[in-house]
Image (cartoon, rainbow, N blue to C red):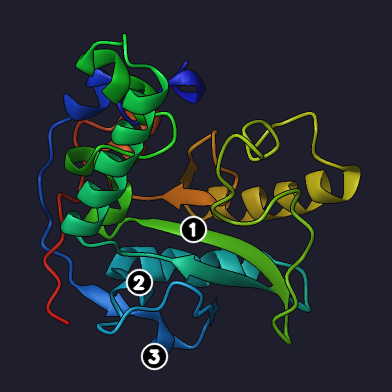
Amino acid sequence: MAQHVLLSDPRIAAVPVKECGEPLVDLRHEKVIRVDSRLADLTGAYAHVRLSVADRLTEAQARLPRGLMLLLVEGYRPYALQESHFANRVARMRRARPGWTEKRLRAEAGRFVSPPDVAPHVSGGAVDVTLCTVDGTEMPMGTEVHATPPEYVDPRFTRSPLASEEAWANRRMLASALTAAGFVNHPAEWWHWSYGDRYWAFVEGAAHARYGPAAFEG
């Protein structure tokens, strides 16, 4: 089933892409959802997403109960940055498992960091989001956004049994709004949702992805 498929799985890379040419838009200017600044960069790349993704976030926001908002932590991620993240993870795995083959190292690294060629964030189709109140106070979700192993290797999974009842309720609320708006979740990260990228196409059974790597001029 798709829920067990990692982004490093060859089946994701095999999904064809028919780039639709949608532009990236800056969610800081849309002012429909809140945009967090913890990963802000000088170019503002982190706050950009494809146009249809922005439209779907607006739809998801409208589905949330009054008093709650989507909080974007990261949207678009430049290819070079994703490449660096993945290479660093492979290097960490290599130090920890010196006897593993390069293929196995990359596959294991792909459990936590997407290979750059298929990375949803590079396409502008992915968002890392959580819930917050109108004043920006984040709701309890069980872990922080971008929680990293080994501390949160299991609780960060969307359906982790280690999440509290309160966190479960908030995750379900987030999932309900985003799923209804057309997004799919990567099950190893409750905060990661995408539309139009290869992973979305694989999960939805679409003939092709709508987005390849996006061009950003910041």
Q: Tag 3, which secondary structure?
A: helix
> In whole angstroms, how far apart are the C-alphas of marks 1 and 3?
18 Å
Residue for point 53% across, 78% down: 36
In this figure, which residue is indicated by the disc labeled 3? 29
For residue 35, side relative to residue 117 (left or right): right
Q: How crowded is mark 2: few (under 14 residues within 10 Å), some or many (20 or more)?
A: many
- In the rendered image, the vertical position of residue 206 relative to residue 74, given as above or below: above
In this figure, which residue is indicated by the disc labeled 2? 46
Q: In terms of depth relative to the viewer, which is nearer, 171 or 60?
A: 171
On the image, the x and y values in percent for residue 89 come to 35, 38
**Residue type (three-letter) at the residue carrying disc 2:** Tyr
In this figure, which residue is indicated by the disc labeled 1? 128
Question: Reading the chain from its start, which is encountered first: label 1 or label 3?
Answer: 3
Residue for point 44% across, 72% down: 39
**Residue type (three-letter) at the residue carrying disc 1:** Asp
On the image, the x and y values in percent for residue 31 come to 49, 88
Q: Tag 2, which secondary structure?
A: helix
Question: Reading the chain from its start, which is encountered first: label 3 or label 2?
Answer: 3
Question: Reading the chain from its start, which is encountered first: label 2 or label 1?
Answer: 2
**Residue type (three-letter) at the residue carrying disc 3:** His
- In the rendered image, the vertical position of residue 16 relative to residue 170, given as above or below: above
